[in-house]
Image: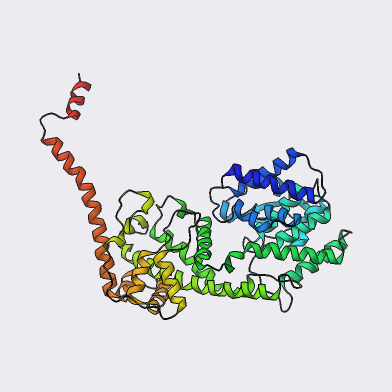
Amino acid sequence: MDSKEAYLQCLEKLIWAIDRLNAEVEPTELARIAELIVQPMTGSWRFFHTPEHIFEVGGKEDAIEILAALFHDIVYVQVDRSINFNVSYYITPVTKEVNKQLQIREQSELSADATFEMVMLVFGFVPGEVLNPFSGQNEFLSALVAAKALEPFLKREQLLQIAACIEATIPFRPAEGRVTVSQRLYDRLQAINSLFNLSLTDEEMRETIKKAVRISNRDVISFSHQSSAHFLANTWNLLPETNHNLTCCGFYTVRDYRIAILKMEGFLSYLQPEVIFRQFEGCPDDRTYQRWETTARYNLEIAKLYLGCKLAAIALLEALSSSLGINVSLAMMMGELPDRTVGGVRLESFFPEIEKPYNPKNSLESEVLNLLENGRAKSNSNSDLEHSPLATFVVKFVGFDEMCYQCDRAKELFKQNLEADDFITDFNPIVTKIVVDSILKLFESRKSTIYRHYQIISELKSKPQTNFQERHFLSNG
């Protein structure tokens, strides 16, 4: 979706939501807000947290949910590496940077601002608090921008509801004892409603939490996708957002790629399916909630095995290339991506057929092998292949148990607890020889391509008079 289309859709949703809330806003103001939202959402680093994402998260039925979704990712410091200049207008009066971290200003530095105080209490933050990028920093700042941008037009009760919905998008938080994340948010709403003499009834506050739950669940709904290929495609959209080297037109290093895969494998291995989705007073119903959690659990198992195989394969490539330096490009070792060169040769072109390929032992292994061989669904980033030819070849040769073993060894290699030569020594020697031979053949094919130019020069030198000599003669009179 290009910026113009995103702007028009955003403006359309703003007009609809504002009308449903019976607010009066000049068209020029709505146009300004739409531009405020779309600018950061269409930034060069955005591959997952895009306009399409915020439109999906908001749904189509509730004005508060739509407005909250439009703003909920407007600030994403780790992805954008900064805060959009126009967005910062709402943030700098109440925050500052201290030791490269964002911090809420001390009480003595803050002006009286009921809207800001209300948003701060929604998140349970206090003046002087250092914001944690992984514990609500971006969501808090996004909610603040939403509240301040909409403050001239909406009631304070509505601003509170929007801020609560954005707070709920802080992901992957466990319950504290028997008190869920949603229950804690409800308790804070009750306190804020009383403190600021707001007019929300208890029923309205409970409905607000249900809106927040719906927003939160739609934000992470890809975990429950029935197709693991699409789940992994969404995962791959996240990689370049926080691994910016992967956006460099395919010219990233073996190490860059490995770091990105390692971080994602570590995150998904740690993530528990119980903390992905939310439920509050029957929203969603038990059957839906259980289905989502069960599917997410399976997708996580798929992802862990899939990423583990890719880590083991890339570790072999990194170990083999280590003697050349740490900045060896992946394209150098594997060949250019197919859409980057016409008739280019890739490493897998030299792999032999395996006479007796590994036969998967269960449905999980079968699905992962299929994903490796035939690919994930298409992602927004074109910096990587959808399929995994090296990992596929190694899995078919040694099987998944061996790949899991090599994945554990790979992590020791990455921690520098294992030397590259030691890692190679305990890798299947036949596989290693085939990969090394294929790399040499890939290099040889490049040598032949370059050598063709040497032949052209030699032929020109053998001619009695070349165009170069004629130009040289004329330029010297």
Quarter of the figure that contains the C terminus: top left
Query: Among all residues in the image, which is located at the extreme top?
Result: 477
* Residue positioned 35% across, 55% down in the render: 331
Q: Can the viewer see residue 104 in this picture? A: no
* Residue positioned 86% across, 66% down in the render: 202
Front one among 409 and 7: 7
**Horizontally, is 460 left or right of 431 in the view?**
left
Front one among 123 and 241: 241
Q: Is residue 265 above or below residue 35?
A: below
Q: Where residue 131 sits in the image (x, y, percent)?
A: 66, 59
**Horizontally, is 178 left or right of 342 in the view?**
right
* Residue positioned 31% across, 72% down in the render: 424
Quarter-of-image position of residue 425: bottom left
Query: Among all residues in the image, which is located at the extreme bottom?
Result: 361
Q: Where residue 289 sits in the image (x, y, percent)?
A: 66, 73
Q: Can the viewer see residue 334 in this picture? A: yes
Q: Where residue 314 sits in the image (x, y, percent)?
A: 38, 66
